[in-house]
Image (cartoon, rainbow, N blue to C red):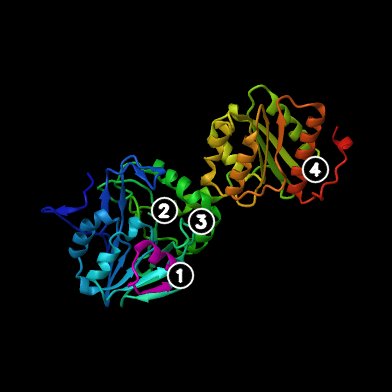
């Protein structure tokens, strides 16, 4: 039978000892159902904060969301006095971790605040205070607490530019901020005691970290040399004291390219998605496909949006070099399946991928331009103007679609000249 950590004694929240030097002083938020507007939280979350006691002072690592400050201060007071606090570290400035900071600084005015260099401009904007002094730190900087020390690792874009991890080498403990965290609220706190949180760990990664895979891999390059760690203490969810390296390994697995296909390094991939009411946009799609196929070393794929759920397409798009959307215009707008796919792409990095749009229309044909604008907003390159065809494409218009596909594929291979293509070659 597992032993519950003592979170409250006689109505007063208590710190939970994690080791000789470290206590958890966070807060539970079991009723939260949506985080940051987009994330579902089926059983709430925790805002984890920590006390580290050294022979020459105390450090506080992160605080909690503003409405949970009372729990945070009560737990802090159960293990430390404010005048002992020498160091306050913010691994990340999002309000769920900085809500109690202004009051903490007021109660411990002698404490020195440590934030990442990238956090400097955010501090004032988020907290709307000029009075905080702070020390900006970078990877390799350390601060001593006497018989132990804290070392900083800048891990930008996990998931904000400011994010860093803080390491306590004397206990092989990593305070990882949002990294390796998840929204999961369980009074048993520790990963070897709480309920099954695998789903939410993966879900959190997919929505928070996945858009920044490149940065995740760079952060793991910093973290993996610290293995084996005794404990990873994230800012949300279970405290990872049992086999913490499994979570590091899982991040590495999740951050690799989704599928190492048989596509060789000198090839490019171009995906064409379309949806079609009467077959007109489909005919355009097929002609674009044929035109693109004529360019060597471009692997072209053609997908009808009606034929799949969105999630597999998102995975495909993440690994593709170019994406083309066939969007008919109905009632002055591109159709919903196209918008549904586009609105699901925020979880992946699309920067500099090639984009293109085409579509059939009956009256006005705004859909193509709308989707082009959206692709640019998602940071794709859209160098070739979209192609619109009124109702049923003629033979000549089908040729122009082939040319469009050919141009897109050439652009992908860096072969596109300033427009010299013999239409006869494409017929
Ligand atoms: Fe938990 Fe990005 O804040």
Verify whether residue 286 appears in magenta.
Answer: no
Q: CA distance from mark 4 to mark 1?
A: 46 Å
**Residue 282, image x and y in percent?**
69, 27
Q: Residues within 10 Å of mark 1 (few under 14, many from 20)?
A: some
Among the two numbered marks 1 and 2 on one chain, the one whose residue lies closer to the N terminus: 1
Among the two numbered marks 4 and 3 on one chain, the one whose residue lies closer to the N terminus: 3
Q: CA distance from mark 1 to mark 3?
A: 18 Å
Among the two numbered marks 4 and 2 on one chain, the one whose residue lies closer to the N terminus: 2
- Considering depth in this image, is 34 or 155 the residue closer to the camera? 34
- Considering depth in this image, is 408 or 357 the residue closer to the camera? 357
User: At numbered mark 2, what does the secondary structure look like: helix, strand or loop?
Assistant: loop
Q: Residues within 10 Å of mark 4 (few under 14, many from 20)?
A: few
**Residue 373, image x and y in percent?**
61, 44
Among the two numbered marks 2 and 3 on one chain, the one whose residue lies closer to the N terminus: 2
Residue annotated with mark 4: 296
Above or below, 161 against 400 in this view is below
Q: Quadrant of residue 371?
A: top right
Q: CA distance from mark 4 to mark 3?
A: 34 Å
Task: Indicate if the residue with disc 2 has its beta carbon within 8 Å of ligand 1.
Answer: no
Q: Residue at the spot x=75%, y=48% of the render?
A: 411
**Mark 4 and 2 residues: CB-CB less than 8 Å, in contact?**
no
Q: CA distance from mark 1 to mark 2?
A: 22 Å
Residue annotated with mark 1: 117
Q: Quadrant of the N terminus?
A: top left
**Residue 380, image x and y in percent?**
63, 48
Above or below, 22 against 28 in this view is below
Residue annotated with mark 2: 180
């Amino acid at each position: 039978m597992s032993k519950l950590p003592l979170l409250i004694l006689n109505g007063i929240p208590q710190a939970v000892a994690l080791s000789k030097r470290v206590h958890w002083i966070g807060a539970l938020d079991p009723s939260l159902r949506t985080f940051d507007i987009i994330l579902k939280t089926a059983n709430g979350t925790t805002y984890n904060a920590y006390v580290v006691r050294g022979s020459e002072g105390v450090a506080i690592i992160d605080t909690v969301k503003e409405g949970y400050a009372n729990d945070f201060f009560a737990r802090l007071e159960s293990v430390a006095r404010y005048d002992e606090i020498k160091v306050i570290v913010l691994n990340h400035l999002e309000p769920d971790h900085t809500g109690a900071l202004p009051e903490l600084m007021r109660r411990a005015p002698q404490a020195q605040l440590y934030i990442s260099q990238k956090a400097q401009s955010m501090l004032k904007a988020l907290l709307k205070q000029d009075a905080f002094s702070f020390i900006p730190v970078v990877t390799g900087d350390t601060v001593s607490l006497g018989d132990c020390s804290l070392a900083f690792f800048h891990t930008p874009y996990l998931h904000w530019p400011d994010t860093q991890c803080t390491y306590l080498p004397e206990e092989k403990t990593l305070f990882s901020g949002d990294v390796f965290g998840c929204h999961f609220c369980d009074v048993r706190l520790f990963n070897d005691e709480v309920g099954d949180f695998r789903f939410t760990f993966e879900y959190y990664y997919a929505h928070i970290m996945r858009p920044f895979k490149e940065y995740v891999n760079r952060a793991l390059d910093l973290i993996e040399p610290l293995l084996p760690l005794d404990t990873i203490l994230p800012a949300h969810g279970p405290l990872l004291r049992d086999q913490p390296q499994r979570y590091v390994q899982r991040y590495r697995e999740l951050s690799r390219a989704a599928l190492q296909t048989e596509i060789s390094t000198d090839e490019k991939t171009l995906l064409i998605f379309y949806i079609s009411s009467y077959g007109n946009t489909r005919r355009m799609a097929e002609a674009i496909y044929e035109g693109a196929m004529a360019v060597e070393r471009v692997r072209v794929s053609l997908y009808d949006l009606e034929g799949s759920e969105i999630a597999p397409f998102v995975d495909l798009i993440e690994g593709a070099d170019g994406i083309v959307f066939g969007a008919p215009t109905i009632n002055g707008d591109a159709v919903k399946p196209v918008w549904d796919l586009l609105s699901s792409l925020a979880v992946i990095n699309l920067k500099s991928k090639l984009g293109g749009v085409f579509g059939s229309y009956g009256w006005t044909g705004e859909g193509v331009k709308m989707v082009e604008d959206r692709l640019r907003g998602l940071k794709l390159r859209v160098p070739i103007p979209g192609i619109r065809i009124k109702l049923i494409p003629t033979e000549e218009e089908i040729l122009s679609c082939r040319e469009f596909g050919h141009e897109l594929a050439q652009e992908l291979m860096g072969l596109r000249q300033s427009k010299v293509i013999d239409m006869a070659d494409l017929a």
